[in-house]
Structure formats: C-alpha cells, structure tokens
Image: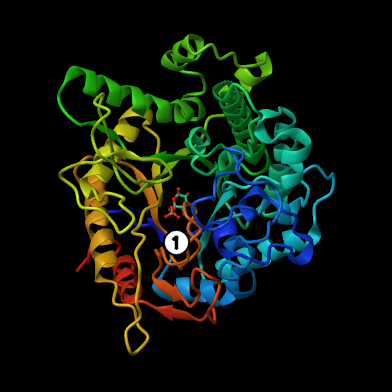
C-alpha cells in the first residue's frame, strides 16, 4: 500500500515567476512581464492602464524575480538535497521564439533549458515541463490578438515541435497549458486577450479556449510521434465546488460551476465537447469556429494523464448577499467551517481528497498533483532561519489526505509537486512576500535584497517525507 515506488515527489515553479533576466540572451517580451505588483496588476483588461509595455510609476517584479536564470544550478542542487524526484518548471516561450512568429528558434534560449535539464539529469531529477505557464509573446498579442486568432495554433505547433525534438531523451513529462480553465477568469494571462470596447468577451474567450484545446491535442500528437515515451498531461486549476446549503438550487449551482471547469478537461481527456457545454454555448449565443480537422484532432489525441493545482475547495450559493473570500485568482463564497491563509484562501485538506475522487471518477486516468501549498509571510529569526511550522502543518494535512485518496480510494497518482518550492513572485498579486518555498530568497516586494537562498525548517521536513516515500509526516 502507500505511494508507488516510483512516486514523483518534487516542487514546482513557473518561468516568469522565478527566472527574471527578462531581456537577456535575446529573450522577447511577454504578457507576464508587463503585469505590475499591486491592485492594478490585471487592469489591462479593463483598459485603465496602458498595456504591453513598462510604464513609469509601476514596479514590474517579473523583470528580475529571483533571478533563477543565473542561479538555477545552485537551486537545483538544493532541490536534489531535499531528494526531489521531479522538478516542475515552465519554458519561457519568448526565450525560444522572442516574437513568437519567427521561423527559427533562438539558440541561446534553447541552450539555457538544455543545460538546466542536464543539471536535473545529473541529480536523477525528472523534469516536468509546462509548455506555457500563462505566457504569450507580446508581439503575438499586438499583431494577432493572442489566442483569439487561429494562427496561434501554428506558432504553438512550431514551439512544441522545437521543444520535443531538442529535448528528446531529456524530458518525458509535459503539460500543454497551465491551468487552462483560468482563461475564463484571467484572460490576459491565460490567453493574451485584450478586449476591445463592446466586444463579446464570452465569445472571444471560448474561441480562444478552443484554439488552445486544439493546440494541446496537436502537441499531444506531435509529442507521441517524436517519442512514444512522452507523457502529456492537461492541467486544471482544480477545487470542487460545494453547495453552501442543501437547497436544491445551491446543489445544482455547484454542479454547474464544476462543469464550467471540467469542460476543458472533458475535451482534453475524452476528446470531444461535452453535451452540457454545447448546450450552454448555444444558450449563450456563442458560436465556435470548429473545423472537421479540429474535431478529429481532439478525438484522436487525448492526454495521458490529468494534472491539477489544488489550493482550496470552493463554495457557491444562489444567495448573493453572503460573504465572499479570496481564492486562486477568483473569489468564492466563504466556507464557515474552514480556516484561511493570510490572503484569505481557505484551507481544506479533505477537499483535496474529494477533488481527487471527483476527477478520477470522471476520467479514470492517472492523476498528478502539480501545485499545492501555503502562501504566507515568512520572518527569518535571529539566526536567519524561517521556522515555518504553519507551512509544514498545511502540507502534512494535504499529503495525508492525498495518501488516503491513494490507499483508501485506490486512486492512481503519479506524483506531487508542491507549489513555489523556492520563494518566487506571486502570480495573483506580484508580491514577493507571499512565500510558498522550502527555500527562502532574500528579496522583498520593492525588489531589495541579496537574493541569497536559505533553507527553511520545512526543507528538512520535506526531505524526510520524500526519503520515507510519504510514510514519515511527523
Ligand atoms: C496558480 C498558478 O494559479 O497558483 C501559479 O499556476 C500561482 O502560477 C499559484 O503562483 C499561486 O497563486 P499566487 O497568486 O499565490 O501566486
């Protein structure tokens, strides 16, 4: 019983939140670079801020982040010391194709990731690579309107073909799009969408989502052609919706909200648009431009495994007057039975088991938890060490629930990568002080700090968890 012997324990990061070096070695500008820290971070969509460039008066944390571009050897060494079996990272698209529509890739960008993967290999760490983690080249947004344009599939195809060919033998596990369902809530980050005045936003979002779904199926096809050993996963921002009350309308609403998210994975895993989605699109007057070729691709090239992030469950009710709380990108009704993090994200370890069961029941494919963790304010003590017992406790409870899902419910789970294994820039707020790591990085919200890496208390705890394959959680 317990976790499989080859269980992939590790941690996860995303290029734009840790690499920095935003214009080094030919890297081009991307949407993820031009989102500043603070309340106006995503106001690009509402048109309050100008866009697609750096403006005076704002601090853009991704420009430098934790400068992993120049520290990756040191960082991977620390991951190896913790015993990581896998390291989830993402490719910055604009390192490979700075504008996105070039015919030839940027060799310096390719060489950077090649060396990074070889460093992982040296320590026996299996890379788990997200092809796009919210990033879209600015040039593709300006010239083509981001993922609303079908041509994006061609540019994405060029990117994946380049990656699968170059890294054959070095990388086996790939995720096509990070949290693909986030396109509905953060369309600039999810798909490089900037809406025109009066544009039918729902129509644009679902068309863009369709292009991503087709691109994902195409990537799956190409990956398997180039190397049959490649394992391709989709990636969902998960967290089951609970009804606030047993009122049938609340229960029904929870089911509808779950559909909203599962729609994406239904297509990627089952290979076709589910009936409920076709009906909902029809009711909403949304017409998807879908070719015969799209339908065939989606049907024939479904994913090998389902990966997802889990931070919390979600709650809904038809009663609009109830209190809401923050969550991963979007708000949810407050669950009166749960505690919350300093950012208001509610903490529900059993919800992880519930979510795993819901996903596994639905798809019957191996699962991979690729994000989970606690964003907290860490204060180093006099000795410089962060005693993050709160993080250990969060992770312990979630790992216990995940273990129950494996041992008691029989779920096939490939691995677990906790989010932000080294402190990095928050995707939601752009803050540095919202830390998730086992490794503290000396850098603050204003960009001050030496970038020095220091182990937190959770570092040794996680090392023990991995060494015992999840048996010793004390
Ligand atoms: C997920 C993203 O939504 O949540 C990550 O895939 C992100 O990029 C993580 O960092 C945690 O969110 P935040 O806002 O606390 O950084």
Q: Can you tell me whether the CB of the residue at mark 1 lies under 8 Å from the nearest atom of ligand 1? A: yes
User: Which quarter of the figure has residue 416?
Assistant: bottom left
Query: From what the image shows, is residue 197 above or below residue 132?
Result: above
Position of residue 457 in the picture relative to residue 19 (left or right)? left
Residue 191: give x, y in percent of width and height.
Answer: 61, 38
Q: Secondary structure at mark 1?
A: loop
Residue 189: give x, y in percent of width and height.
Answer: 57, 44
Between 148 and 445, the one lying in front of the other is 445
The residue labelled by disc 1 is 420
Between 457 and 296, the one lying in front of the other is 457
Q: Residue furthest right?
A: 103
Query: From what the image shows, is residue 20 above or below residue 306?
Result: below
Quadrant location of the C terminus in the rendered image: bottom left
Between 155 and 35, the one lying in front of the other is 35
Q: Residue at x 15, y 44 (%)?
A: 337
User: Which quarter of the figure has residue 11?
Assistant: bottom left
Query: From what the image shows, is residue 338 above or below residue 260?
Result: below
Residue 224: give x, y in percent of width and height.
Answer: 62, 38
Q: Residue at x 34, y 89 (%)?
A: 383
Query: From what the image shows, is residue 257 above or below residue 450?
Result: above
Q: Residue at x 65, y 48 (%)?
A: 31
Position of residue 168 in the picture relative to residue 465 (left or right)? right
Residue 163: give x, y in percent of width and height.
Answer: 69, 49
User: Which quarter of the figure has residue 158?
Assistant: top right
């Amino acid at each position: 019983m317990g976790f499989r012997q080859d269980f992939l324990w590790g941690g996860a990061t995303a290029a734009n939140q840790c690499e920095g070096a935003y214009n080094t070695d030919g890297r081009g500008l991307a949407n993820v670079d031009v989102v500043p820290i603070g309340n106006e971070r995503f106001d690009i969509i509402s048109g309050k801020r100008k866009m697609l460039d750096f403006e005076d008066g704002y601090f853009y944390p991704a420009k430098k982040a934790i400068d992993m571009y120049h520290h990756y050897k040191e960082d991977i060494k620390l991951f190896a010391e913790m015993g990581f079996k896998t390291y989830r990272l993402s490719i910055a698209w604009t390192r490979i194709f700075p504008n996105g529509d070039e015919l030839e890739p940027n060799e310096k960008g390719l060489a950077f990731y090649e060396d990074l993967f070889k460093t992982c290999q040296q320590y026996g760490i299996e890379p788990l690579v997200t092809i796009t983690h919210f990033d879209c080249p600015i040039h593709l947004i300006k010239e083509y309107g981001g993922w609303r344009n079908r041509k994006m599939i061609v540019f994405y195809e060029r990117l994946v073909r380049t990656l699968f060919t170059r890294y054959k033998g070095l990388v086996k596990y790939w995720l096509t799009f990070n949290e693909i369902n986030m396109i509905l809530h953060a369309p600039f980050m999810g798909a490089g969408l900037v809406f025109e005045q009066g544009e039918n936003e729902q129509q644009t979002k679902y068309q863009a989502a369709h292009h991503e779904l087709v691109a994902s199926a195409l990537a799956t096809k190409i990956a398997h052609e180039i190397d049959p050993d490649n394992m391709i996963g989709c990636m969902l921002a998960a967290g089951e919706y609970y009804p606030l009350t047993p009122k049938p309308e609340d229960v029904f609403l929870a089911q509808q909200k779950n559909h909203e998210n599962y729609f994406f994975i239904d297509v990627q895993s089952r290979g076709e648009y589910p009936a409920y989605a076709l009906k909902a699109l029809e009711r909403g007057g949304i017409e998807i431009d879908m070719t015969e070729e799209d339908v065939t691709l989606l049907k024939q090239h479904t994913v090998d495994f389902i990966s997802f992030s889990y931070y919390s469950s979600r709650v809904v009710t038809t009663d609009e007057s109830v209190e809401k709380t923050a969550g991963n990108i979007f708000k949810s009704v407050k669950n009166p039975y749960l505690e919350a993090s300093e950012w208001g994200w509610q903490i529900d370890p059993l919800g992880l088991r519930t979510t795993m069961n819901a996903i596994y029941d639905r798809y019957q494919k191996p699962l991979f938890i690729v994000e989970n963790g606690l964003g907290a304010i860490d204060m180093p003590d006099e000795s410089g060490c962060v005693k993050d017992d709160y993080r250990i406790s969060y992770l312990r409870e979630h790992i216990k629930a995940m273990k129950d899902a494996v041992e008691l419910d029989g779920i096939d789970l490939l691995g677990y990568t906790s989010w932000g294994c080294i402190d990095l820039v928050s995707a939601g707020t752009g803050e540095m002080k919202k830390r998730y790591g086992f490794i503290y990085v000396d850098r603050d919200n204003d960009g001050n700090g030496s970038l020095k890496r220091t182990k937190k208390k959770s570092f040794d705890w996680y090392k023990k968890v991995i060494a015992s394959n999840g048996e010793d959680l004390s």
